[in-house]
Amino acid sequence: MVIEQVSVFVENKKGSLKDILGILADGGVDLRAISIADTSDFGILRMIVPEPDATLELFRSRGVTASKTQVTGCKLHDEPGALHKVLSTLCDADISVEYIYAFLTRSAGDAYVILRVEDNAAARDVLQRAGHSLISQDDILTL
Amino acid sequence: MWQPEIEAMGRDALRYLQEDRFRQVWAHIWDDAPVQRGLLRDAGAERGDAPSLDGISKLPFTDKKAFTEHYPFGLFAVPREKVIRLHSTSGTTNKPSMGGYTVSDMQNWKDLIARICAAAGVTGGDTAQVAFGYGMFTGGFGLHQGLEQMGVTILPMSSGQTEKQLMMMRDIGPTVLVSTPSYALYLSEAVREAGIKGEIKLRVGLFGGEGHTPEMAAKIEENLGITATSNYGLCELGGPGLSGECLERKGLHIAEDHYYCEIIDSETGEVLPEGETGELVVTSLTREALPLIRYRTKDITRLTYEPCACGRTHARMAPVIGRSDDMLIIRGVNVFPSQIESVLIRQEHIGPHYMLVVRREGVTDTLEVQVELVDGSVLESFPMLEQIQGSIREQIRNILGLTVKVTLVAPQSVERFMGKARRVKDERGK
Ligand SMILES: [Zn+2]
């Protein structure tokens, strides 16, 4: 039930985000989810893609600083309070979330969140026991 | 010691010798060196008022410009047939400085090289791999001849052909490596990658021709298992041998019987008191082919006349921290790119290239240090990235007493240079 996220370093200057997305476009990479966090100096662009290893290699071959991390993906019912339930479950288990981002897909009625936690295995365990459904890398291919 | 009677002579006797030789240089210049003589005359000096070294600060400086203007032989003070060797600096855009040697200059040079080699612990039983370029550069032939004079076995490899250098290291077992520090670092990385540190016998490195940071020396020492020593000289003043480190490694002993040194404020030209940091100015005391009075080296260092534990009495200069041309003054603080480089070279996760940008914001000067983030493993959290910035900022503040802005930039985005890097963009006054 592991999902691999690709992170890249983005300079905070005009055109750098566009250049990064240009690399993805050239490589024919289909973005499933994307999130950017930035300070006044730089940003980190995080993304979920169908083939994280190939995407990582693509970035590195173009001289972009990039890395790959494991994250937890969770499927939500597209209704008010759904995300609150997920976070409450983690909070009750004393698992803190470093960052979170959501994405929608073609299948109506469902939403997904990507959760970055210290201990993915523990997070998956409590989420599953509380009845939440998790998504895997294989699911990413079909979403 | 190669010449203990000179290298360990009392300071009073040394001063007497310097004064005596300075009077000879004075006469030689007035008799035989039209350009240098003209400089003295323009400054109002007369042959009759031969000054003592105490009064040398009244005399005008000589600088590299004189070499360019009077290229190639204008500064020579002997007939051409007395010159037995020419060497030059590497300049190609500007005319290089042409250096020359008489028979006597050549003998002195050999002794000066033998002194710095002996000070670094080299003896006649050693084998030296000379990986300095042989050619117009003073380093290759200079070290070669001095080592030969000591009876050292020489492997005249010149620079380059790293594979072959490594092969010789293993097959012949040289104990001494002569090189620029940057090539030594490169060779040492090759030795580490080949995993042959245990098969080589190198014991000591003699590094010169360019400056290096202590961090760079430590890296070379670790990779090769040697003691790294540094030596100094300028083509204009006769090449390497002007000064070199003893095994105490607390400064480079200057051959004071051949060179009289001063430290000046490079802005005002005023002589600075002992121990203060400024530009090194050198007067040659024995050179026949090219006598120079108060030559401005543009190299920034400081001098100490304190006794050294090795027994040599000659003054020591600190390793050169930069060139006066490269010095930046930011909020009243003197900053050399090499000082910032010494922080960056130790920092993990970033690449070796950097750019310094100086700006004026209102009435305040600011310095931005741009470094390339090359390690993706730190992308997981902002705190890690901020920690890299903070650590660089803090270390620079400790060294310079100056708060700078550290910017992480993408790999390959800092400009690359063929040859001499220009790592400073001064946008003040634009
Ligand atoms: Zn000493």
Image: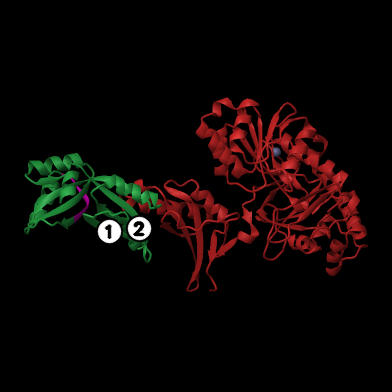
* Mark 1 sits near ligand 1, with its Cβ under 8 Å away: no
Chain whose colour in the figure is green: A
Q: Residue at x 84, y 50 (%)?
A: B287
Q: Which residues are magenta?
A: A94-101
Crowd around label 1: few <14 · some 14–19 · many ≥20 (10 Å): some
Circle 2 packing at 10 Å, graded few (<14), some (14-19), many (20+), is many
Q: Is residue B369 above or below residue A69?
A: below
B419 displayed left or right of B194: right
Chain B's colour?
red
Q: Label 1 to label 2, Cα distance in Å?
A: 9 Å
* Predominant SS along the magenta part: strand
Chain letter of mark 2 equals A
* Whether labels 1 and 2 share one chain: yes
Asked if the residue at tag 2 contacts the one at tag 1, i.e. Cβ–Cβ closer than 8 Å, the answer is yes
Where residue B79 sits in the image (x, y, percent)? Answer: 91, 54
Query: Which amino acid type corresponds to the residue marked 2 in the rendered image?
Result: Val
Q: Quadrant of residue B253?
A: top right
* First in sequence: mark 1 vs mark 2: 2
